[in-house]
Each structure stands twice: as C-alpha cells, then as structure tokens.
Image (tube, grey):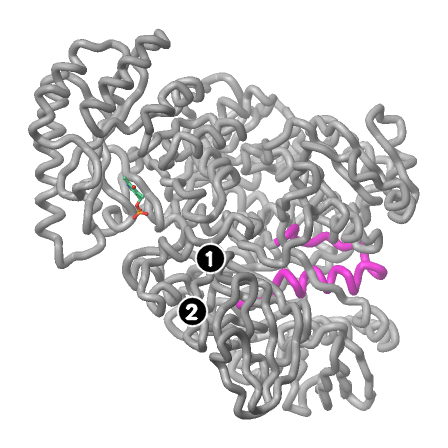
Amino acid sequence: MTINSTLLAKAIHCSFMNENIFLEFDHVSIDSRSLQNGSHTLFFCLKGHNHDAHQYIESLIQKGVANFVVEYIPDVVKNKAHFYIVENTTVALQELAQHYKSEFKSLQTIAITGSNGKTIVKEWLNFLLSPDYAIVRSPKSYNSQVGVPLSVFGINEKHNLGIFEAGISQHHEMALLEKIIQPSIGVFTHLGDAHNEGFTSIEEKVKEKTKLFNRCKIVILEKNDFVEKHISAPTFTWSFDNPSANVFVVSKVKNNQQTNLKLQVSNHKIEINLPFTDDISIENAMTCIATLVYLKVDFYVIQKRIAELYAVEIRLQAKKGINNCLLIDDSFSSDYQSLKIALDFLDQQKVHSKKSIILSDIFQSGLDVDQLYHNVTKALESNKINRIITIGETISKHLEHLPNVISFSTTQAFLQQFNTQSFQNETILVKGARSFHFDEIVVLLEEKKHETILEINLDAITYNLNFYKSKLKPETKVMVMVKAFGYGNGGYELAKHLEFLKTSYLGVAFADEGVELRKAGITMPIMIMNPETSSFNTMIAYQLEPEIYSLNALKSFIKISKEKNVSAYPIHLKLDTGMHRQGFEAHDIPELITILRQSNFVKVTSIFSHLAASDELNFKDFTLLQINRYQQMAEEIKSKLGIQPIEHLLNTSGIFNFSEYQFNMVRLGIGLYGVGNSKEENQLLQQVSTLKSIILQIREVTPKESIGYGRKFMVNEPIRVATVPIGYADGIRRAWGNEKGYVTIHNQKARILGNICMDMLMVDVTHIPCQEQDEVIIFGHSPTVIEMAQTLQTIPYEILTSISQRVKRIFYKNG
Ligand SMILES: *Cc1c(COP(=O)(O)O)cnc(C)c1O
C-alpha cells in the first residue's frame, strides 16, 4: 500500500498539515509494540476508555517514527515529529480507510458478518477461491471498528478480490464499517441469540447487522424469511429444510470422519463430502458452498476443494517447546500480512533473547516475488531474527544471501535432518502455508504432548482490566494481584501482558514468586505480601518491595537495608482495620512513627489495608467502619511523617461496590480473571480461562456392569462411556463426580459417572456423537467456574488456584 500526504489531507480533517512537504507512507500502525517502518509509518494515536496511545509517542520517535495522527501533542514531544491533529483519531483512521478503499473501485469485495463463524467462513472462502483470484482478506479476526480499517490498508493494485469480515458490539457501528468496506457481495453466516451481543431484541440486531449489505448486489445466507425481510438486496440462499432455496440440502449423512451432503441446485444434483461432522462446521461449509455456487465455480471443483477443507486455527499460540524453548505456532497460514503480525507477536515474547523462525514460501502477497522477499528480508532484519530456516524453493532462493539462513526445499527434507538438540532456550516462530504441513514440525518441537490444557484469553484479561478501570478515575493506579501463579492462570505471560497494559504494580504472595518474574524479565514494581525475614536479602537483590505488617518485620528489614547500604528502599505499610490477618493496629502507630522518623534506609511508598467483606452489602456498615479506621490511622502516619504516599484499600468487589474509596490505587484480583462477586458483575466480564482435555477412549457398557472405583455408578441400560485424562490430581474435586458435575463435548453436557480418579474421569456420551481425541471442556463457558464453585460449596478462587501445575497453560490473543 501507499498513502501519500495528499490523500491523507483529503481524507482526514486535520488542523495542521504542511502543504510544502510531500510524504509517502507504506505502513499504517496503531500498535506501539508492532514493528514500525521509520519515516514510512503513519502512526494513529488511538484513545480508548482507559488507554491512550499518545503516551507511546516518545518511544516511537526513538524508533524512527516521524508522523503521527493525534488528538493533542504531549509537551515532551513538541516539535519532534510531524503531528496531524484531529478531533478523534479513531474516526480519522476510519475516514482514511474509506478513502483508501475508494481508490480501488474495481475490486470485487465480499463482506461477511453474523454472530459466529465470520473468521472461519472468511478463511475457508480464501482457501476455496485462492486458485482463481488474487485475494486480500482481513488478517486473523480483524473485524472491529479499528480492525476493518487496518484490513483495508492491505489492498494493493494486484488484488482482484477482497474478503473482509465485519463485527459490531454497538448500534450504528455497522453503517460505518459498510462505508469502509463498500462490499458488492454480502455473506451472512449465522444469527445467534440477541443477549450475548448487547442487543435487546433479535429484530434490533438483524436490522443493525444487515446494514452491511446496503449497497450489495447480492446477499448469501441460510434461508430465513425473517432476516431476508430486512435485506433490501436480492438474496442467494441455502437451506436444510426449504426446497425453494437456491442450494437445497436434500440429505445430510454423518459417518465417522465426514458428512455426505446431497444438494439440489436448480435442476442439478451434486454430492459433496465434507471432512467434518459437527453442525457448526456443516453450517459454515454450506455458506461457503452457496458462495461458490453463486460465483459460478464449477461443481466438480467445488466438490474437490470442499473435500480438502481443514480446521482453522485463528489464533497465535505460544506453547512450551522442547529444551526450554517457547514455540509460536502459526503453522496454517503464510501470507505477508499475517507474517508481520506473527513477527510482532514473536517480538513481544521476551522470555529468550534468541529468536528463530521457520518459514515457508509465501503466497498471495499481491506483490511480485522480488518485491515480496525484499520486504520479508527487511522485516526479518529489523526484528533481529537470529536464525532463519526457510522451507520451499522460492523463499530459499530469495533469502539465501542472508548470513543466518539455513534452507530446505521441502518439509520432508527438514524433518529428515531434524535434531532436537539444535533447538535450545530460544523462541521459535513456526509459520508456513498449509500445503507445507508445518504441523508435523510443531509436533516435534512441542514439549511432551499433554492432552489437558488451560487456555487463557489475554484479550479477555485486557477487557476485564478496562472494565474495572472504567469504574475508576483515570489517574488511579492499579496494582494487579498475580499471587498464586496469577490465580492459577500462569505467572510470567500474564505479568508480561499487564506490564504492556501499563498497570502500575504487581502483587504476589511470596518473594520466590517475585524472583521468578524478575528472572523472566519483568521490570515493573512488584509488592510482596508475605515477605519472610529469611528472604529480605533476596528481595533487595531483585528489587522486590515488601509489605511491612509488624514492628518486628520493620526492624529486621531496616537492619538488612543498613547492612546492604541501601537508602529510601520502598516499603508498603499494611494496616489491620478489621480483617485481623496481618497489619499494624492503632496502638502500634506511635512506635512505627518513631522508628520511621529515625531511618533513611526505607521509604513508605504506600499505606494500605484490606477489606474483609467488600462483596457482602449486608456488611456495608462494617466495611464503612473499616474505611473509617483506615483513614484515621493513615492520616496520623501521613501527618506525623509529613509524607504523601500512595494509598489503597479496594480489591475487586471493593472497586465494584465502594469505588468512592479508591484513594490513588486499587488492588485488582479475581475480577481480572473474569470472575466477579455478584451476578451483575459477572455479566459485565469476559471469561478468561478454559480448562480443556480430550476423549481418550470410548466404550459401550451393558446393564449390570458398573463404572469406576467402588462401583458407584451402576449401569441400567446400555450406555456409551468416554474416559477423559484429567482427575483430582489435576485439581478437579472428587465431589464433582457421581453425576454432580458434568463436562461439555460438542456443546452438549456429559455427566460424570462414578468417582473421579486421580488422573481420569468417565462421562456419559450415549447421546453425543463424538469420537476419541475429540475436545472436552472441563470448565469455561459451560460449566463456568462460578457454577462449579456453587455446586461444590466453595468459591471460584479455590477452583482456579487448585488447577495443578502439571496442566499446561496456553495463552492466546486474537490480534
Ligand atoms: C488477594 C488480595 C487482593 C485481591 O482480591 P480480589 O478479591 O481477588 O480482588 C487484594 N488485596 C490483598 C491484600 C489480597 O491479598
């Protein structure tokens, strides 16, 4: 892409633009973490509720970025770059995208929306149509008010088909996306239920979503009179039950691995074998088939290509690799746009300084080959990749001049010489086109395969953090409690993410936890809640800040500070105002003040206390009493010492219920992980963790037999039983067994039969079509951690922190 300053001036209404300077940009960025292209980057400083990219300008200037679209110019960077001042940077980004798209009048454009399946349908259409078109498409799930503009900037002159997805969360957003995408073909994937998307009625939702199709000449969807009523364009439909649809499914027969579909298309019959059996994939495939039929792709070709459809892995995953490596698995796509995203993701993983990449030939760039690999070379160089392994004739030829390249003509050739010892303590990005079968490389590089994983959605973490921040004043600091391995969700990766989100402090329970984080490269301030005297030396060595909760602890810490010859070492004073767990009481304060007055070795960075019942509004009076006690004690310390430290009192439910007492910092814990303390609060949060396993074995069991230890489940009629490799040693309580609890397989509940074993449990799948190796959800959407805690008469905190360390954690984000 190229955007010049003339187009920019035309598109966005900015208050300053030096007409004498003509500039050209080949890169639009909104993310300070991503690789910039110096003076060729146009950076948009977006402002969200709780996020303001203007604060990154200074560091971006250091990276060579010289052009910014801003809402204001921060003092420190005045006159240091070109600034284009607009009223709203997000709107400016959208306007620029709209103008940019308009330059490609002849580009045939498909826009996809719907409640589910947008990304899958987009990826599948791309796969199915790529032999016939030069396609540009939204990377990953870039379908938002910001994602769509960024997708559109991927277009260049060589493309002849655009496939973009559009997703909305509020009213009036779709009209805007429509203006940017300007589609001529609409695809509507699926109409979910209204509630989970912030609409009050289905009607309202349909009206909003179909605005995407305002200028389409055709809209492709499952036949649905109610939806079609709202679409002004002609439609092209498919259906399982209505023979008047353009593509009618006469029969659908599932066997083990695939679904046989017999279709009627006007007076032709076609038979298609789809390599999936679940209903969602069948629906998405039908949407794709209808689109291909509409585009007049030959029936024989449709048959052949549908048979090759594959499961789409939308997200970038960081996985534990062999020999302490970190593996980033992006083994299903290889286009230039997604390469850039993957390189950014690689750059953000700072666990190892050494970085390797295994990369296949790149397709569909819309650039000529020389230009493409020139860009790739530049990207690899500026990302400082230590070792580049190229697989494929074309890429190998174009990159062989680089000093750190090892090349192979095929994946087989690479696998034949593969030696586990050649990968150690490094981060490895595996990125290849599907036809290269890089999944075989991933299998070798992945640490021993453990079927049970806890998946953590970092986007949901961001969302939840912002939700609590929206309850606070913008200047209030946030300490995030990552004690107990981030409430079971993993320490380092979370901390890294929170550091990027510019939270102010991390709080952990023990010094060891803090040391781990420091060793992994976390540099932000860390408070230790239970510092043991024996760990004081270590804490100073790693710049960990102790919570001081008694006169004895204070005296020993000062003594060690003196020996170490440190001065003004940050400490945090904990006051006991009613929790009666740790902290200074009112009668300790005079002596506390005397000691602190005499010592320069430590400095009171913050004063705080902890509420015992911030979640129980029945105890509101008691909470207010605690707050009152806190204010009196803190006031005495502050005035007698003449200091203005940070003050903090509220945990998650405190923020929700008592935000007027936020002082200048809060301590957020459980809410970040998607669990609030009330129903209303829970509905406003996004679910963060999903505990998954697989079906190890399936068997039929006949009456009079029993299941598991102690014969607790007696079989009365023939049943089908699946064994899942997770048990109480992984943190699943035995009390969840014996049909009290359930797991979810293909969106259906399967009750747990008999006692839960140490490493396994058995479930009833009589009514669920499934096979060995299929995915099993232990908790996530259903059951939720909250539901489990209720049944087990405990609290979600206990469920989350009980998940054993042997369960592998996988972190992901969408963009
Ligand atoms: C754990 C903890 C928190 C966080 O509590 P949540 O209820 O999880 O938000 C805050 N402060 C202290 C002192 C804690 O120990």
Residue 679 appears in the figure = yes
* Element carrying mark 2: helix
Residue extent of the magenta highlight: 115-140
- Residue type (three-letter) at the residue carrying disc 2: Trp
* Element carrying mark 1: loop
Image side of residue 40 versus residue 370, left or right:
left
Residue at image location 87% in from the left, 39% down from the top: 395
- Position of residue 231 relative to residue 806, above or below, is below
Residue at image location 63% in from the left, 30% down from the top: 352
The reply to whether the magenta stretch includes residue 602 is no
The reply to whether the C-beta atoms of the residues labelled 2 and 1 are less than 8 Å apart is no
Measure the alpha-carbon separation of dots 2 and 1. Answer: 11 Å
Q: Counting residues from the N terminus, which is met first, the one under dot 2 or under dot 1?
A: 1
Residue 234 appears in the figure = no
- Position of residue 420 relative to residue 37, above or below, is below
Please name the residue that numbered disc 1 is placed on: 731
Image side of residue 376 versus residue 196, left or right:
right
**Closest to the observer: 4 or 265?**
265
Please name the residue that numbered disc 2 is placed on: 736
| Residue 117 x, y percent position in the rendering | 60, 66
| Residue 383 x, y percent position in the rendering | 69, 29
**Closest to the observer: 196 or 185?**
196
Disc 2 crowd, CA 10 A, few/some/many (<14, 14-19, 20+): many
